[in-house]
Amino acid sequence: MDRATQRLCYVLQQEQPVLFGDERIAFTRTVTTIPELHTEAELAALQETQWIHEKGDVFNICVDYTRLLACGFDCKKAQLEQQMADFLRLGDSEKAHYIHCQIKVLNAIQDLADRYRALAIKQGNQTVAKVLANVPAKAPQNFLEALQMLRILHFTLWAGRNYHNTIGRFDQFLYPYFKQDMDAGIYTEETALELLEEFFLTFNRDSDLYPGMQQGDNGQTIVLG
């Protein structure tokens, strides 16, 4: 767990923010290789006594993104810090350390978001700068912010070398943000569709860096029903 935490934080720290023209939804992978958790000798020793499926990484997961979308990082970190204090008070250092690792990851993600915002300000991209002033630290307040935060969370799953990361019931947990903005007259059906298309295009800017059965088969699937 410590290695996985350290690796993810390292990869996020090595990321170089990139913004293209007038894009409204940021985050593009620049780190091409993610380090292994084990040396070849360690992995061989593990395989002598353990059955390791595929690459041994976490994969084919459907995340409940609402657990972070609903509150934002600041609120979630406050909750985690309270949990960590409770575990320490009970003498459960192992669970407290696990929570500590989660907080470290949230801080690393926020740091990358802050660097993206600094680049947006420098390049004069007011849309991205404004969005990243709120998310992921705070809960999204509109459809664009919700899409951007989801992109950040999904991006992070890949940066942790998890693979086949779905976006699950996207139609359900993004619908409240969509409906709010549509009811307010912020978008027409055409402009809302254009923003949604831009969101899905963000998946394809760096998909060649993601592992998959074949290029383009990277588990970026959606569940509808």
Image (tube, grey):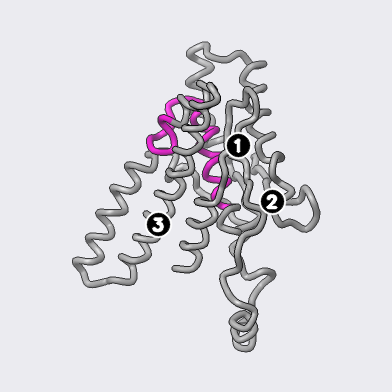
| In contact (CB < 8 Å): disc 1 and disc 3 | no
Q: Residue at x 77, y 47 (%)?
A: 216
Helix, strand or loop status at disc 2: loop
Q: Is residue 48 above or below residue 16?
A: below
Q: Residue at x 59, y 55 (%)?
A: 61
**Earlier sequence position, callout 3 versus callout 2:** 3
What label does residue 85 carry, if any? Answer: none
Q: Is residue 134 above or below residue 112?
A: above
**Earlier sequence position, callout 1 versus callout 3:** 1
> Where in the figure is residue 220, as x and y percent of width and height?
67, 46
Nearer to us in this view, 120 or 26 = 120
Left or right of residue 26: residue 73: left
Kindly identify the amino acid type of the residue bearing the numbered disc 3.
Gln
Tag nearer the camera, 1 or 3:
1
Query: Is residue 153 in the magenta section?
Result: yes
Left or right of residue 78: residue 186: right
**Which residue is denoted by mark 3 in the rendering?**
102
Tag nearer the camera, 1 or 2:
1
The CA span between labels 1 and 2 is: 24 Å
Nearer to us in this view, 158 or 118 = 118
What label does residue 18 carry, if any? Answer: 1
Nearer to us in this view, 134 or 21 = 21
Mark 2 Cα-neighbour bin, 10 Å: few <14, some 14–19, many ≥20: some
Kindly identify the amino acid type of the residue bearing the numbered disc 1.
Val
Helix, strand or loop status at disc 1: loop
What label does residue 219 carry, if any? Answer: 2
